[in-house]
Amino acid sequence: MRAVRLYSAGDLRIEDIPDPGHPSGRDVRLEVELAGICGSDLHNYHTGQWISRAPSTPGHEFVARVVEVGNAVRTIAPGDRIVADSRVPCGICATCTAGRFYLCAEMGFVGEVNDGGFAPVSIQDERQLVRLPDQSVSPRIAALAEPLAVALHAVNRLHPTPGDAVLVLGAGTIGVLVAVVLKHLGIVDITLSDVNSERQAGASSAFDLLPFMASDAAAFDGCVDTTGSPAAFDVALAQVVRGGAIAVVGLYGRPLTLDMNRVVEGGLRVSGCAAFDGELHDAVGLLSSLTEPLERIASTTVALDDVPKTYEILSSGRAPVQKAFVDPFL
């Protein structure tokens, strides 16, 4: 079967690989319906930061149908539609034994420690799968469950209250999903910012959000930075009021230098957002009620052979869309 394979930083290939065969034990054979390209996929491609085995098939944001199950599988059955929990914690470190799996010191991810969804078929452990309560939800909506969980976690870390003004930096997938979650929670004063004017305009039009113009006066109670850009984080520090909060989701390509005096003297709360905790189940439960705004996210769907080119377009910062999906059967 054809699959996308990551060998090393900058080395992404489309290859024929053996079919993974029949599942055993707690493993499940899945037919992938649609998989999303994540910003962390791009980060790993450019930096090689999380390459623990090579080659591997990326793709941790996917929806699939269960085809066959191993003899120890108990929670799902053939015919079920599922989404993948991208996290693969070690289960034995201090944070795992304390039940804080999302902070695992040895955290791996689907598509890195095993083969992911950029292929027609994937084998996953039953524990990596969440059954869709609404089995009729469209693949395009279901494939957003994992990034929606990331957005939910970021908003939970920010902990906004009604009446807060919130700045969202970055109008990519996570930034727009953060805006969707904020609106769902009743936050009205939301401002979305992106250096890509096309992407910002599309997101603003879809969600009635305003483009952001930086000023010297702090104007926001909270900020979610999804960009991984040092310049954007400087904006966050300047624009959040004293006593405000910043939640950081973006992955940085290099170490960040920041003015800690702004943090200390301003009494700012800065929270890192490591993937998600229990929010994937919450996200799956919200898919049906959020279908309308999720449908309006600008997206494109590509074939396996187009993934390397799509990686480059998305990495350029000039893509007009929020999300690119991979259909392994195109």
Image (spheres, rainbow, N blue to C red):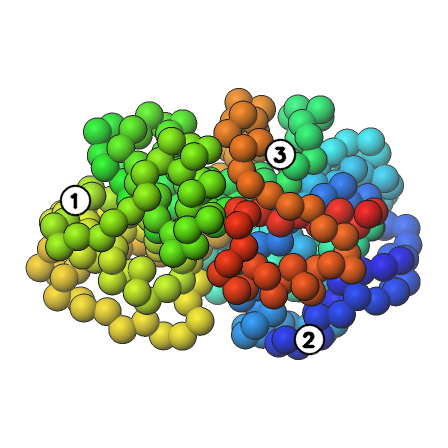
Instruction: Kindly indicate the quadrant of the structure image that contains residue 183.
Output: top left
Which type of secondary structure does the marked residue at label 2 adopt?
Answer: strand
Marks 1 and 3, how far apart at CA: 34 Å
Q: Earlier in the sequence, mark 1 or mark 3?
A: 3
- The type of residue carrying mark 2 is Asp
- Where does residue 171 sit, x and y in percent of width and height? 43, 48
Q: Nearer the viewer, mark 1 or mark 3?
A: 1
User: Which one is nearer the viewer's eye here, 305 or 248?
Assistant: 305
Which type of secondary structure does the marked residue at label 1 adopt?
Answer: loop
Q: Residue at x 69, y 35 (%)?
A: 139
- The type of residue carrying mark 1 is Ala
- Where does residue 123 sit, x and y in percent of width and height? 79, 52
Residue 141 — which label?
Answer: 3
Q: Residue at x 18, y 67 (%)?
A: 260
Instruction: Kindly indicate the quadrant of the structure image that contains residue 72.
Output: top right
Q: Residue at x 49, y 60 (%)?
A: 317
- The type of residue carrying mark 3 is Ile
Q: Earlier in the sequence, mark 3 or mark 2?
A: 2
Residue hosting label 2: 11
